[in-house]
Image (cartoon, helix red, strand yellow):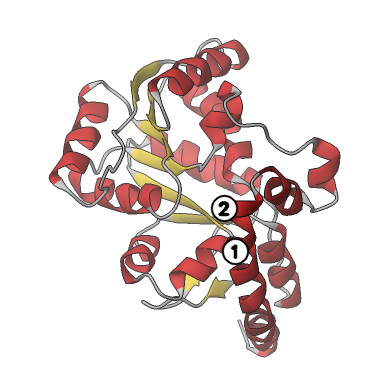
Amino acid sequence: MDFPSVAGRIAVNVPDEATLLLKVAEKLEKREGFALATINLDHLVKLKDDADFARAYLLQDLVVADGNPVVWMSQLADQPLELLPGSDLVLPLAKVAARLGVPVGLIGTTDDALERAAEAMKAEVPMLDIACCIAPPMGFDPDSAAANTVLREAENAGAKLCFLALGAPKQEILAARGRTVTPDVGFVSIGAGLDFLAGSQKRAPAWVRAMAMEWFWRMLQNPKRLSARYARCFVILPGLTADAIKQRKQPR
């Protein structure tokens, strides 16, 4: 399944978690770098207008569905995808890294949150080697010389798999840059995944997520910031629905 962007159509090319874990394990075993993005409705809004973000997305090696609307669109297109939120991928991917003896890096959020997230990850995955925790300063530009410094710091620390918790579009742009600056390192964009592990942000309860209402729960927590964002998301739904139905009718 693919989606429109200002720089070209973006393919969601990994359908489920089992396939994703196999692909990541293969790349880590071969010491091949990669970039993994988790596309959601907010990203699709940004991808319509932000050319830098769209170009960065086109450089992602692996793209999965993060968000029930994306999953529903895939079903309309008769190309079903499993829901794989970035925050749900941290521990499964950490387990893959630990099994293969691959050191990981944590990049983003704050020093305190990174420390607590690292402790939580080690508690769940005792054999995990966390090579570095890097919290870029406020105003960090992922397309700058400072970004190169962060990427090389992670590489020099020995990290071969880095979790990026910078939010979109910064994390995807940094991951795309990493494919050139540090081509042997894998990058996974996870949004608030480390903050959830650290406890600095509270995730919606499992029963809310099961009802596909996490977006509403989040909006209630921060209506001033998120109401406008979700309004923009709803505006693009009719066009995405029509596009998905069109893909269903196309030969594959």
User: On the image, numbered disc 2 is attached to which residue?
Assistant: 225
Q: Is residue 11 visible?
A: no
Q: Nearer the viewer, residue 11 or 168?
A: 168
User: On the image, numbered disc 1 is attached to which residue?
Assistant: 228
For label 2, the crowd category at 10 Å Cα-Cα, with few meaning under 14, some 14 to 19 and many 20 or more, is: few
The x and y percentages for residue 78 are 73, 75
Quick check: 149 above or below 57?
above
User: Quadrant of residue 15 in the image?
Assistant: bottom right
Which residue is located at x 32 percent, y 35 percent? Answer: 31
Quick check: 206 above or below 158?
below
Q: Secondary structure at mark 2?
A: helix
Residue 120 lies left or right of residue 207; in this view the side is left
The x and y percentages for residue 40 are 58, 59
Dots 1 and 2: beta carbons under 8 Å?
A: yes
**Tag of residue 84:** none
Q: Quadrant of the N terminus?
A: bottom right
Q: What's under tag 2, amino acid-wise?
A: Arg
Quick check: 75 above or below 186?
below
Which residue is located at x 30 percent, y 33 percent? Answer: 136
Residue 207 lies left or right of residue 74; in this view the side is right
How many marks overall? 2
Q: What's under tag 1, amino acid-wise?
A: Ala
Which residue is located at x 70 percent, y 54 percent? Answer: 82
Residue that extends furthest to the left in the rendered view of this protein: 145
The x and y percentages for residue 176 are 31, 53
Q: Between marks 1 and 2, how big is the CA–CA gap?
A: 7 Å
Quick check: 86 above or below 128?
below
